[in-house]
Amino acid sequence: MKSEVLRRALAKTAAIAAGAMFAASAAHAAGITGAGSTFAYPIFARWAAAYHDGGGTEVNYQSIGSGAGIAQVKAKTVGFGASDMPLTVAELDKAGLVQFPAIIGGVVPVVHVEGVAAGALKLSGKLLADIYLGHVRSWNDPALVKLNPGVRLPAEPITVVRRSDGSGTTFIWTDYLSKASPEWKDSVGAATAVSWPEGVGGKGNEGVAAYVQRIKGSIGYVEYAYAKRNSMAFALVANREGMYVQPDIASFQAAASHADWKGAPGFHVIITDQPGKATWPIAGATFVLMHRTAADAAGAREALKFFDWSFHHGQKMAEELDYVPLPATVTAMIAAAWASGIRDAAGKPVWQ
């Protein structure tokens, strides 16, 4: 039922977006324009459909990856960008941008191994890094067999699937691997785009999910909603306490509980590899990026109205897709940041 509701929401939002995404004049006529994170696309699509059904402005959001979303908002071709990698204060200042979190979710490793069901395979962070570094190349590698007694692992090669585009999901993934593996940190690092040692590249969470579904013996990483919607087999990953918890809203919330939004300039918070026995280790937030000085003040106000509505009316929708909605204390901080941080050309606040 949830997947069918999401499918209809995605189809509706795709139809809305098809006509006006990149034409600036048409975009202003049609409503709010945004682009970026594929991590947040399922919930943005759900929110956009519900907001429009309730009489709100159309939201034309294109799922093109965080890197492209950052580039588009900097170029002022969209009203807002969305990235799963938060920009630093220095980066925000240089581009004249503000950012705020919109939603929290989790990234999961997904596999296509015959006979291995969802949640049956266990992995450590170091083992994941070794697979993506090319050190572990077969599913019956001794390191995998040792960690998974009783699971029949075939003697077939592992095909690594990763993102081909600039991706906030990749940032979350590589940030976690950098914390789990000193070798990964030193040789590859964490970013929206890295020099991959191995793998086949797919565009967007959608592309990675499609490759893993097609390629026998493959492993990839996607935002959990994509794995759930496509009934993909995901692996469990040991957290800092050595526990293997299910990826779901409870374990993502456990990770989110450690976020210190108040003490983070520019809302710059990263929540991978957080402590706690109930924590999913590969979690992150999607951040919305907007210009501090809005060339189109009315458009900026409409975008903020959409996110304000989402914060106050979209919690249940987020939870149904296993995202973690932001608590009221954080959304109040965000509204205060809007009022002080986003102004029109005359210097007047866009949000009051």
Image (cartoon, helix red, strand yellow):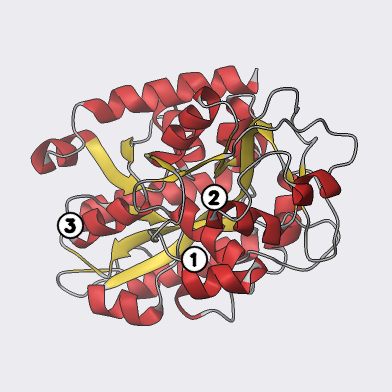
Picture coordinates of residue 187 (x, y %)? 48, 71
Residue visible at 51% across and 75% down in the picture: 186
Q: Relative to 186, is 278 on the left or the right?
A: right
Q: Are marks 2 and 1 in contact (CB under 8 Å)?
A: yes
Residue visible at 75% across and 28% down in the picture: 116
Q: According to the image, label 1 marks what residue?
A: 334
Badge 1 density bin: few <14, some 14–19, many ≥20, Cα 10 Å: some
Badge 3 density bin: few <14, some 14–19, many ≥20, Cα 10 Å: some
Picture coordinates of residue 167 (x, y %)? 40, 52
Q: Secondary structure at mark 1?
A: helix
Q: Nearer the viewer, mark 2 or mark 3?
A: 3
* Amino acid type at mark 3: Lys
**Which comes sooner in the sequence, label 2 or label 1?**
2
Q: Secondary structure at mark 2?
A: helix
* Amino acid type at mark 1: Ile
Picture coordinates of residue 44 (x, y %)? 45, 40
Q: According to the image, label 3 marks what residue?
A: 76
Instruction: Give the image quarter of residue 322.
Output: top right
Residue visible at 39% across and 49% down in the picture: 305
Q: Relative to 2, is 342 on the left or the right?
A: left
* Amino acid type at mark 2: Phe
Q: Decide if residue 269 is in sight here.
A: no
Q: According to the image, label 2 marks what residue?
A: 311
The quarter of the picture where the N terminus appears is top right
Using the image as rendered, state which of residue 105 and residue 301 is in the foreground: 105
- The relative height of residue 162 versus residue 170 in the rendered view (above or below) is above
What is the distance, in whole Å, between disc 2 and disc 3 at their CAs?
Answer: 25 Å
Picture coordinates of residue 295 (x, y %)? 15, 61
